[in-house]
Image (spheres, rainbow, N blue to C red):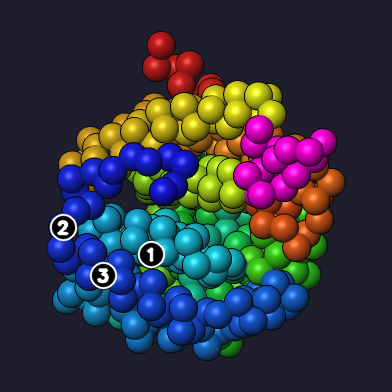
Amino acid sequence: MPVIDVPDPEFMQDEEIAVFRDAVGKFFEQHAPEKRVEKWRENGMVEREFWTEAGAAGLLGMTVPTEYGGHGGDFRHDLVVLDQQAEKGVDGFASSLHNVIILPYIVRHGTEEQKQRWLPRLVSGELISAIAMTEPGVGSDLQSVATTAVKDGNGYRLNGAKTFISSGQLANFIVVVAKTNPNERAKGISLMCLETEGAEGFRRGKKLDKIGMDAADTSELFFDDVFIPAENVLGGQEGRGFYQLMGELPQERLVIAVGAMSTIEKALDTTVEYVKQRKAFGQTIWDFQNTQFVLADLKARGTAAKVFLNDCIAKLLKGELDVTTASIAKYWLTELQGEVVDKCLQLHGGWGYINEYPIAKMYRDSRVTRIFGGSNEIMKMLIARSM
């Protein structure tokens, strides 16, 4: 029995969801066994072939309407993929970025022509997506981006540099946050969609050497007078980019909270199993009252967090998840994730610091969740504004 024993909410008990969960789990078992995932960790990125395999199996574009090659599902289907990916230990596969963050930009904000042109290839895995927001000199303040897209004939010339870009080495479809009007802040931002194949002036920098998330490809990108056709401005009109970004942030932040909850559960399950087997001073680590008190506290707070998270998911499915609640979820669950993993590592003793133990990998991978998707300091500012 899992440590956090919260029943699936009613909206996840649909028979079709159960069938889909089984199919996704079998796909990951067959196509992403530990040996293959270990190669991804060694290489610092997932193979491109895996994306086409995932596309063929129906794991990409679950919420994309069927008329654009998608599967016509909803956020629950995305949750199943994320849950099974975490359960099977499939590191590096950026399904949450591709399915839950980037594809909705095209579905909700793209022109009809853009949807017809890009969505089928994003669903098949022919196109692997990335979003280029962060710059070397600009972190969470998106209104201050320095990358520019200046009009040139029937298009734009894109110039700038981006960093910390997930899937930056693999992606061949990149949504670039740029200033089409450098004299404006929010109103000057547009989202420019770039297909990288044959794009002159586009250059991938080095794959960044990170503390954790070894199989996830994170890179620098450079744009030197890259031509972007006018029809590649998302939504067909410049100046809408900031508002498009803000509209999708609640779902993005909820996805980060979902990932945090998966790690919290996995850390607790792994640690309870470990402390009940490991012996010291003639008894198991579990037999010490301190161990029981620490884990009881983490179970209590983890249980409360999962109930809250399920309520947030229910709100999202109804279209009722607001920015403040999503910010609370991202902030609270990633902070709890860090604390749970840290205390669980402590209970492993010296072995917790050895990479062959799952808790060590969780410790390294968890730290960044308090930074990406908007730092937790930004989350607290957003929460404070609602008071």
**Which residue has dot 3 on it?**
20
x 40%, y 28%: residue: 304
Magenta part of the chain: 274-287
Mark 2 to mark 1 CA distance (whole Å): 15 Å
**Rendered view: 89 above or below 332:** below
Camera-nearest residue between 218 and 191: 218
Residue type at the position of mark 1: Val
Residue 72 occupies quadrant: bottom left
Mark 2 and mark 1 lie on one chain; the one further toward the N terminus is 2
Mark 1 and mark 3 lie on one chain; the one further toward the N terminus is 3
Residue 36 shows in this picture:
yes
**Which residue has dot 1 on it?**
81
Q: Secondary structure at mark 3?
A: helix
Front label number (2 vs 1): 2
Q: Secondary structure at mark 2?
A: loop
Answer left or right for 287 relative to 157.
Answer: right
Q: Residues within 10 Å of mark 2 (few under 14, many from 20)?
A: few
**Rendered view: 128 above or below 373:** below
Mark 3 and mark 2 lie on one chain; the one further toward the N terminus is 2
Q: Residues within 10 Å of mark 3 (few under 14, many from 20)?
A: some
Number of the label disc, if any, that sits on residue 14 = 2
x 73%, y 52%: residue: 360
Which residue is farthest front?
A: 282
Mark 1 to mark 3 CA distance (whole Å): 9 Å
Mark 3 to mark 2 CA distance (whole Å): 10 Å
Q: Position of residue 371 (x, y in %)?
A: 63, 41
Answer left or right for 160 relative to 98.
Answer: right
Residue type at the position of mark 2: Asp
Q: Is residue 47 magenta?
A: no
x 25%, y 74%: residue: 70
